[in-house]
Image (cartoon, rainbow, N blue to C red):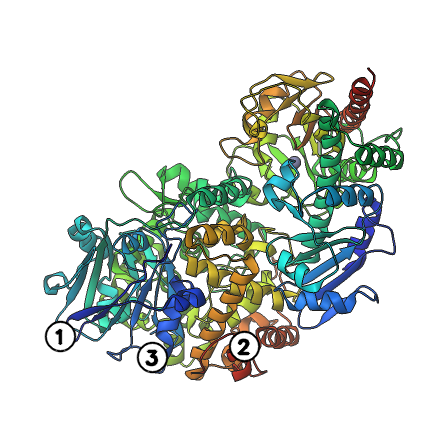
Amino acid sequence: MFLEFEKKLCAGGLTERSSPLMGFLDAALEWNRNDSSIPLLEKVIQGLSINSILFSKPAEPYQTIISYLAETSKGVIYPEDCETRTFLHDLPISRTLDTGEIVTILKKRKGVIIPDLGLITYGMVSLEQAYVTYSSICFACFVKFFSDYLWALRNGSVDHLFQKTFSQVVKMLDPYPSFTGSLIKGPLDSEQLVLEAMDEAGRLTVENRLVDSYFGNISCRLGNILYISQTGSSLDNLTGCIDPVPMDGTSCTGITASSELDAHLGIIRETGCHTILHGHPKFSVILSMDCDKAGCDQKGKCHIQCSEERDICGIPVVPGEVGTGVYGLCNTVPKAIQEHDGVIVFGHGLFTIGSEDFYRPFSNLFHIENQCREEYFRRVSDLLSP
Amino acid sequence: MMYGWCGKIAKIDLTTQSWEIEEPEQSVYHKFIGGRGLAGHYLAPHIHLAWDDPEMPVLIFCGPLTHTISPTPGRSTFMSRSPLTGTIGDSSVGGRFGTELKKAGLDGMIITGRSSNTVGIEIKDASIQIVSADAMRGMTTSQAWAGLKSHGSVAAIGPAAENNVRFSNIIIDKHYAAGRNGLGLIFAAKNLKYITVRGTGKTRIFHPGNLKKAREEIMRLMSASPVISGRFGISKYGTGALYDLMDARNMMPTDNFQKTKFPDAASMNAHAYDKQFQPKKTGCRGCHVQCKKITDTGRSIPEFETMSHFSALIGNHDREVVMEANRICNEMGMDTISAASTLACYQEISGHPISSAKIVEVLLDIAYGKGSYANLGMGSARYAQSCGKPDAAVAVKNQDLSAYDPRGALGMALAFAVSTRGACHLRAYPISHEILRKPVATDRFQFAGKARIIKINEDVNAVVDSLTACKFTFFAASLEEYASVFSAVTGQSITGQDLLKIGERICYQERMMNAKNGFSRKDDDLPPRFFMEKKADLSDSILKPIDRNAFQKSLSDYYTVRGLDQDGMPVPEKASELGLEWI
Ligand SMILES: [Zn+2]
């Protein structure tokens, strides 16, 4: 049980190998290893009604980013990406490793940042929740750091510390991802082929660190069936987690399908595509939130009702929230994706499509993210040059 | 001054036909919240009484979030000692009864005594009247509703309760059942046919701005939830949306739990009802999910449990019969799950299938206590016992299992066994993580970790039933978000984990009440068929019998986590830690 999440954390570049300390509690408490922090964490567990806990120091560049954000915040970090807004709300900080303070914070929120020492997160059902929260905090802080820097640069408010930290962080970024291999070729004309291709594309997306494994979904159409990843499934472990959904609506088995099922069906209806990939690559998300429109009256509501027609490198950017509400992205993405390789949802992530197999959606996810990253640093250098 | 709560409870004595208003200390509200928690607090001192003792109270409570803009606020709790199980008996019910009660300025009512003739209670704001209802004896619940709806929200019993059916319900506003524990029979024991309530008051909100913000956070999560708001979710199809999934997971109880796959499932699913009957959305007051489906002609589409048990469990392939069986159960005021289960039990014992064409007739015989099926009104467990075949009843503490085969979800197996009101899927609702993957998926074929998960979720749902809110909301949101709603409404600063502690207190108090009446480990068990290799025909299924040792180990773990001794009995130290008086 512990091993699975140790592996995921390391492979995703979220922690160093020796760092994660994990506890799981049913009638008795078990730890993944020995550590001097265990007595403290046991006290934290006693103060809460939970069944799993994770304490780990984030790997770089997350550690530097989170320490900077913690230091410059007033006790709580407020990221504006969609994941945080929807699921985490905000990111509280405990200045010290004090049991009382940590328990007080965790009574209210799913995780706590302890600057220089790491993150503590927990689950009430499984360790997976602790992992997801940990990963979400890293993601949210990364996105906030780069967004804030660009915003501060536009507004001439980058101070020495910010500039110094930014330069450090940039040096520690992963190299640009590149991919030269191949994927299962279409047409994907049998259920087995569909499942294998989805499995492969999902796994490669995570292995190449385009997204963290929990964030994203994938689908493939075969005849009148849409095969789609289940809600809360991991792109790098889709075995047994793909729902066949009859497109004529005659069965509700799709009730466990991804919350973006409606968006996927809408995209297929509008474009006739057969394969769809959705993930949250970081620079696509960061750039989607970079807007220089002065005095905009939609400010603060960009994620639900931005009225501008925006694009990044020709890829449309649309507002929309997770799921099927009035402001759901299922209402914006399908229309916008026509005649494009993909669509970026404001503060959220990227959808890409293909006609035969997953090569096009996968490589486009790749290219768009790399383009966004290049574009980010182009904007930075434009703003820095007089 | 109080926010959220009204600070008033009506105590009505039917023997003396008098009533008074109690104004509880604020600390009582802080300790038990409302709904199920507060009802339990007022039931505890009387739990040793027989269910039909005149002094046994019926408790009806709403909560601090009732009649506010909190998402899904419209539920209320009905509670007493269950005539079916002998345990505490309670039901969280929808409709608009809770809302009207709150508008009338009451957090709850406590009804004791027994009237010498049949009466109704009519509440209109500060006025409470006990009126003769002799003329209404024998009326069906919809007849009662039609005559009373101008008085506000209506809670009424039907012929089943009047004819001593152990699984009789109280029906709210024609369509909503306070079901499962036979609470209708308590009304009948008091000679109480109905209660109407209407109010004009407003709920005082401590911080409307924060409430609006907290509401938006929950609404955003609900929109993001496929189970609630998705194309195949319960907002679109009602709870029947689960039918296909139970079929796909091979855990649809078939032929009285002798099989787990129903060959005709595809033609009996929610989509088929939707297509044939084209229902419209409706639902509890103040709720935007609107999971209740009703046709233009006022026919109610069955809930998932009813849809499943009146088809697969009893071998019926006719949707029209399911619709009618559902209607008759509501009209008569009978629990659909128990009614279908009792038919299934009868079929197994007698070896005589009841044909689809005859089902409605049999149900009417049960409700009116006449004909050769009259004795089925005692419920499956007592009936099987009387035939000398107790194992033919698929029940825990005499209450029939709902439509999830526990071999297909081992957390559900444990939850059925330990529920304080007899077999109940809603106490811990492990289907949420074992099948619906919310908040994350757990391995449904493993007991590992389940003891604590069940305990925590029992605590969560005790809070949900006390606030009040709807359990379906918790496919998407959590107590973390509801704590903000609670704080904004009441002005009492609280966290999700603080609320959980209250939930633990509520559950422990229920265990204490059951222990007082002799319930212990021996009662926290499943019917033998789920552990037996031979009994079940699982040849076409992926399910295996439950490993009895693993089950017992998980049960022991649950007792440890819950702070009970290994016989499942409460201990004074834990009770005092939770601030409970020993009973
Ligand atoms: Zn997404």
Tell which subunit mark 2 falls on. B
Percent position of residue B436, x then y: 57, 51
Q: Which residue is mark 3?
A: B46
On whether disc 3 and disc 1 are found on a single subunit, the reply is: yes
Q: Quadrant of residue B444?
A: bottom right
- Labelled disc at residue B577: 2
Task: State yes or no: Cβ of the residue under disc 3 lies below 8 Å from any atom of ligand 1.
Answer: no
Q: Which residue is mark 1?
A: B116
Q: Nearer the viewer, residue B221 or B405?
A: B221
> How many residues crowd mark 2 within 10 Å: few (<14), some (14–19), many (20+)?
few
Residue type, numbered disc 3 = His
- Labelled disc at residue B15: none
Percent position of residue A60, x then y: 85, 43
Distance between the alpha carbons at the discs numbered 2 and 3: 23 Å
Locate ligand 1 by image quadrant.
top right
The residue at the point 84 percent across, 55 percent down is A19
Q: Quadrant of residue B374?
A: bottom left
Foreground mark, 2 or 3, reads 2
Marks 2 and 1: CB-CB under 8 Å? no
Q: Is residue A86 above or below residue B185?
A: above
> How many residues crowd mark 1 within 10 Å: few (<14), some (14–19), many (20+)?
few
